[in-house]
Amino acid sequence: MLGVRIALGGCRGREAIHYLTKAWCWLPGKPAMTKHPNWVPCVSPSRLRSYSSSTSPAVEADMHKTSPVCSYNEWDPLEEVIVGRVEGAIVPQFSVEVKANTNHQHWGFFQQLGGQPFPPEHLERAKAEIEELCNVLKHEGVTVRRPKQVDFQKEYSTPDFTSTGMYAAMPRDILLVIGDEIIESPMAWRSRFFEYRAYRPLMKEYFRAGAKWTTAPKPQMSDALYDMNYPMNCKNERSMLAASGRFVTTEFEPCFDAADFIRAGRDIFCQRSQVTNLMGIEWLQRHLGSEYTIHQLSFDDPNPMHIDATFNIIGPGLVVVNPERPCHQLNMFKRAGWDIVTAPKPCIPDDHPLWMSSKWLSMNVLMLDPKRVVVDKSEGPTQQMFERLGIKCIRVSIRFANSLGGGFHCWTSDVRRRGTLESYF
């Protein structure tokens, strides 16, 4: 049976290879099938790269010892994570890029409160939820780090625009961890221009401890980055625009939110969205080089922004998909032997305020390892889905924190997971 799985290839074939019990490995400059005292299961030289890292396990282990940052996917055992802050959260000013990313039923909220704090009672309840999330993560053995508090209400100006800030609630949006490198993304909202300041003490600490630290090109955010005449009112028209590749962001300069990328070892999947343009995707591919491949996906979504409530990879060859936003490239995953799981309908009530997100935050979960997941305790159908997959649910409520624009995956950025670079595709 094991041989059949290997012959079939895909993620199952790759997984089967790691269970081979023969302690043989091909070594450069040695005859084929030379036994190595510190063996790792391998395949023939011609197929080696398809199934595992070109970096030896010893080097991978050293990387974990020398760098506090090391994460290749969304499911390896989580050791350290950054959790965002509620404190100081400011409603973004209602500029064109914010308008294009928010539901028209909330436009009055932004017009009235833009540049001011979110409702204080709501923030207090959200803060209590996130503090409980931190406590649960610590109880599960995860080291929790937090950004510093910043005055986001202070107005700032550049030669191209004036704005107030927003928050440091969603580290997933700004920080992209690839291996031992942590990348600050060039986000597209003007209100997030200086958001990196909340994370700089952590970035400097990680850098001094041996991590790679990269800041993507900072966008000017002049009017040229935005389609100032982008249609906003008609959902059907926006669906057609998204299908044709037209979004509120232009190709004036690279921009991307890190949350538009989801990692599966050597393969990284992303979407062109209202906040991520093709130049941003190309910049990241060139920066990472040939060791990684970025695959662009597209969905039936009139307002794409952040991939992890539409397409969430939760294990090797295992992805949860949104039934309302079907993926146009799903066959490539089926051909590779991946298991496709359709997310159940969310349980968030209609009257709950979701100012910057959708109900599909129900599938925006955080994997602690392949057999444990943090999921909202009110999302019974989602819990049942994971239990059928043999995954234990760690139940936490962040319903009020959801209103600020994210679920568990958004509120966190995994700094270190215990694993190595592999190919699952």
Image: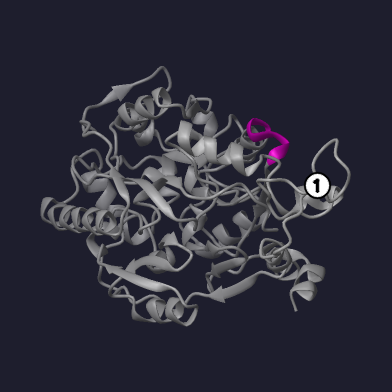
Residue 87 is left or right of residue 349, and the answer is left
Residue 27 is left or right of residue 103, and the answer is right
Q: Nearer the viewer, residue 142 or 175?
A: 142
> Would you name the residue on which mark 1 appears?
26
Q: Quadrant of residue 189?
A: top left
Q: Is residue 400 visible?
A: yes
Q: Nearer the viewer, residue 394 or 161?
A: 394
User: Residue 29 at x, y = what percent?
Assistant: 85, 35
User: Residue 386 at x, y = what percent?
Assistant: 44, 76
In the image, residue 90 above or below residue 411: above
User: Residue 333 at x, y = what percent?
Assistant: 69, 66
- Give the amino acid at mark 1: Trp
Q: Quadrant of residue 396?
A: bottom left
Q: Is residue 256 visible?
A: no
User: Residue 103 at x, y = what percent?
Assistant: 38, 59
In the image, residue 134 above or below residue 149: below
Magenta residue span:
286-291
In the image, residue 346 above or below residue 63: below
Q: Is residue 64 magenta?
A: no
